[in-house]
C-alpha cells in the first residue's frame, strides 16, 4: 500500500481535529456548488459580499439602507431612523433626536437613499414580511425604486415591491407584539 507523504497526512489530520463532520461536509458542499455554478455562485459564498444574515429575520442578499447605525437600519412607523437596540429617535448622525430646530432627521428610504444614490428616484416602501426575533415580531421592509441596480451594486430583485418597482435596500421595524 502506498502511503501519502507525511505533510499531506498531517494536513488531513489537522483538518479533522479542528472541524466537525457537518462543518467539513458544508465546506465540501459549498465547493462543489461553487464549482458547478461557476463564478456567480462562488461570489455568493464570499464573506462580506452579500451580508446574507445581517439582521434577524432577513436571510437574503439585499443590504440595509443607509442609516446612522448601518447595517442595523431600524426605523419607526414613519420611516425615520431609530436606535437599533433602544428604539429612541436618532438624527442623521446617530445622536438622540431631541431638537428639531438644530438637528436633521430624514426618512431613511424616501430621503436618505436618493440623497446618497443619485440614480435612485422617488423610492418608497413597497412591502415586506414579519418574523419572530428575540421574542418580538420584526417587520422587514423593502425600499423600492425603479433602479435595476440595488445597493449591493448587482441586479435588483422584485421582492415585495409593487409592479414596475424593485428592491433597492431594506430597513426593519420592531413591533410591540410578542411571539
Image: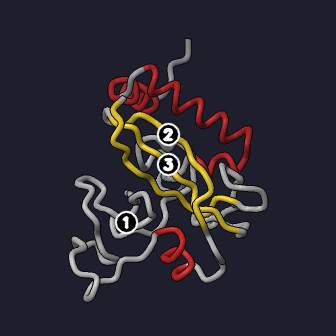
Residue named by callout 2? 130
- Up the image or down, 33 lies above or below 172; here it is above
In depth, the one of 23 and 176 nearer the eye is 176
In the image, taking residue 62 as reference, residue 92 lies left or right, namely left
Instruction: Give how far apart the Cα atoms at labels 3 and 1 are.
Output: 14 Å
In the image, taking residue 74 as reference, residue 143 lies left or right, namely right
Q: Secondary structure at mark 2?
A: strand
Which quadrant of the structure image shows residue 134?
Answer: top left
Q: Secondary structure at mark 1?
A: loop
Identity of the residue drawn at 72% across and 47% down: 38
- Decide: few, some or many residues near mark 1? Use Cα within 10 Å; few <14, some 14-19, many ≥20: many
- Decide: few, some or many residues near mark 2? Use Cα within 10 Å; few <14, some 14-19, many ≥20: some
Identity of the residue drawn at 33% across and 24% down: 17
Q: Is disc 3 in contact with disc 2, using a CB cutoff of under 8 Å? A: yes
Instruction: Give how far apart the Cα atoms at labels 3 and 2 are.
Output: 6 Å
Count the labels in the image: 3
- Up the image or down, 157 lies above or below 139; here it is below
Residue 18 appears at what percent x and percent y? Answer: 33, 29
Residue named by callout 3? 140
Name the quadrant of the C terminus: top left
**Residue 81: assigned label:** 1
Amino acid at each position: 500500500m502506498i502511503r501519502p507523504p507525511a505533510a499531506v497526512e498531517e494536513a488531513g489530520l489537522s483538518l479533522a481535529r479542528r472541524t466537525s463532520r457537518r462543518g467539513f461536509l458544508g465546506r465540501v458542499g459549498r465547493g462543489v456548488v461553487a464549482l458547478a455554478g461557476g463564478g456567480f455562485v462562488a461570489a455568493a459564498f464570499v464573506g462580506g459580499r452579500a451580508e446574507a444574515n445581517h439582521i434577524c429575520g432577513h436571510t437574503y442578499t439585499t443590504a440595509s439602507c443607509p442609516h446612522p447605525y448601518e447595517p442595523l437600519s431600524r426605523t419607526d412607523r414613519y420611516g425615520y431612523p431609530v436606535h437599533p437596540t433602544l428604539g429612541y429617535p436618532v438624527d442623521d448622525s446617530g445622536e438622540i433626536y431631541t431638537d428639531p430646530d438644530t438637528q436633521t432627521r430624514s426618512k431613511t428610504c424616501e430621503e436618505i437613499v436618493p440623497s446618497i444614490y443619485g440614480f435612485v428616484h422617488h423610492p418608497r416602501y413597497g412591502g415586506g414580511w414579519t418574523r419572530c426575533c428575540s421574542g418580538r415580531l420584526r417587520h422587514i421592509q423593502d425600499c423600492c425604486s425603479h433602479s435595476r441596480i440595488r445597493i449591493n451594486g448587482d441586479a435588483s430583485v422584485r421582492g415585495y415591491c409593487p409592479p414596475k418597482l424593485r428592491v433597492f435596500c431594506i430597513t426593519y421595524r420592531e413591533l410591540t407584539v410578542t411571539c
